[in-house]
Amino acid sequence: MHLARVVGTVVCSHKDARLSGVKLLMIQPVARDGSDVGRALVATDAAGAGVGERVFFVRGREAAYPFHPVEVPTDASIVGIVDSMDVVA
């Protein structure tokens, strides 16, 4: 799992039918200290996240699991909203 910050929403007028009703969000991966890491990406939202929230997401085949039995064509999915974090050095 990876940490990210939700930086925007994505609206598509034409998309794969299996994405019907699935919210798409733009996320920016972050390091433990909150600094940006890499490029922003689009992720499906299985947790009900919103812009500005810190989330954790999965990539790869596991990204489709929260939507089972529908085979959603995604390679990144938000699976949780982070309420707090304690980092031990």
Image: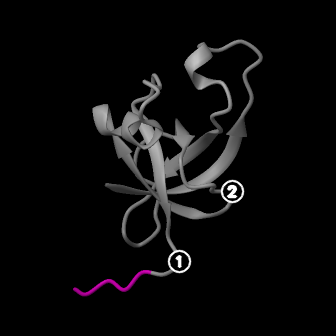
Q: For the magenta stretch, what is the residue range?
A: 85-89
Residue at 41%, 73% in the rendered image: 33
* Residue 83's disc number: 1
Look at label 2 and name its amino acid: Gly
Where is residue 85, by image quadrant?
bottom left
Which image quadrant for residue 21?
top right
Direction from residue 30 to residue 12 in the image, left or right: right
Report if residue 87 lies within the magenta region: yes
Q: Position of residue 80 (x, y in %)?
A: 48, 60
> Which badge, 1 or 2, comes first in the chain's sequence?
2
> Which circle marks residue 40 in the picture?
none
Indicate the amino acid at tag 1: Asp
x then y, percent, for residue 81: 53, 65
Q: Residue furthest front?
A: 69
Give me the residue at 43% from left, 37% from top.
Answer: 76
State left or right for residue 60 relative to residue 64: left
